[in-house]
Amino acid sequence: MANSTSASLKLTVQATGENSGTWGQITNTNLLIVEQAIGGYDTFNITNANRALTFSNGAVSNGKNAVIKLTGTITTNINVTIPDSIEKTFIVSNGTTGAYTVTFKTSSGTGVTWGTTDKTTKMVFSDGTNVVDTAFTDLSSDITPQLSGALDTNGNDIIIDNGGALEDDSNNEYIKFVKTGSAVNEISVTNAATGNGPTVSATGGDSNLDLNINPKGIGRVTLGAGKIQQLTEKMTIAATGTTGTVNFDVITQAVLYHTANSAANFTVNFRGDGSNTLNSIMDTGESLTCAFLTTNGGTPYYNNAVTIDGSSVTPEWQGGSAPTGGNASSIDVYTYTIIKTGDAAFPALAAQSQFA
């Protein structure tokens, strides 16, 4: 009885009693083919024409390798085929250059296609009729890997590269991560049971930590209807006397304190900062309250004019009349509440108080 070949790997199947007592070339070749199927690697060059992998009977062949890397510069869409009857698993890497598709398929059936820019590695199998994608892809080159269930890190960390982000299903960023060299502090988020609020905390190696929230440009931090607790206000201390026009930049301070004796009556000009008007950063229906502290020596001076973005404003003063002088050897505190009622429309309430 003559020998035959196996269906998929084309091993030589010897007939009963054939080559009895002899270790020969047939066995060695079969072992080489098995080695190919388990751990073999081959590059297969394709250019501008469809190509077929070979499965020769009783011989080592390029199609029998476990891993096949497709190479070459392709100038058209390419089909790489295997015989219809083959049942085998392949790891196929698309290492070609050129913006064309590559399809790995059986001669008569369907297959798996790499798109024009898809240069990934895929695990596929042939069922003897078609080539099917197992969906086990090379995660390092797959730009859209998908999970079929929740990701359980099993107590391990997830490492995100500097500048990396978590994105939604439209590839829009939720959160972006930026690295600080030698960082020891971080943010911790704690969920909560019914009746309690979740917590965002500054944690880390330092004993006392700020929690910084920085809007972009002249943007603002907006809170809901809740309360703000344990909040301090930003204060600027200027070791100069008050005189002329003093710009009060509300973006950078809520309180401005001049510690040296004032030298003349002065105008307070309210603005966003040197680059932004107050009108541009406030919406109609908003208000702000701030304080200006000026030090007087034996000769007192006072705030005799108020402007907003350089335009004159006449405040409504506490007590019904504007001050006509300062208080000697005192710190005079001026408080201003500015209300925006329309575009560049700012009613203002003001008060002068003496501290000595």
Image (cartoon, rainbow, N blue to C red):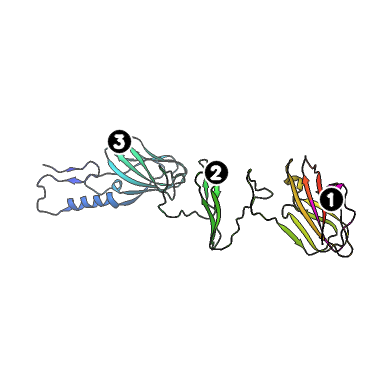
Q: Is residue 59 magenta?
A: no
86 left or right of 323 in image: left
Which callout, 3 or 2, points at the residue further toward the start of the chain? 3
Label 1 crowd (10 A; few <14 / some 14-19 / many >=20):
many
Query: Which residues, given as a range, are shown in magenta?
Result: 315-335
Name the mark on residue 306.
1
Residue type marked 1: Val
Across and down, in percent, residue 81 comes to 34, 40
Which quarter shows the N terminus?
top left
> Viewer-nearest of labels 1 and 2?
1
Pick the quarter of the image with the C terminus: bottom right
Tell me if label 1 and label 3 are in contact, CB under 8 Å: no
- CA separation, marks 1 and 2? 46 Å
What residue did someone put label 3 on? 129
- Tag 3: residue type? Thr
Badge 2: residue crowd in 10 Å (few <14, some 14–19, many ≥20): few
Question: What percent of the width, then of the height, locates residue 106?
Answer: 32, 38
Mark 2 or mark 1, which is nearer the start of the sequence? Answer: 2
Would residue 178 be seen by someone viewing this image from the given angle? no
Residue located farthest toward the top when viewing the structure as drawn: 108
Q: Is residue 131 left or right of residue 185?
A: left
Depth check, mark 1 against mark 3: the one in front is: 1
Of tags 3 and 2, which is closer to the observer? 2
Residue placed under numbered mark 2 in the picture: 172
Task: Say what amino acid the circle numbered 2 marks.
Answer: Asn
- Other-residue count near label 3 (Cα within 10 Å), few / some / many at <14 / 14–19 / ≥20: some
Compared across the picture, whether 312 is left or right of 194 comes to: right
Q: Residue 285: x and y, percent?
A: 73, 40
Question: For numbered disc 1, what is the local secondary structure?
Answer: strand
Residue beneath the point at 11% across and 54% down: 22
Percent x, y of residue 70: 38, 47
**Figure check: 117 above or below 205:** above
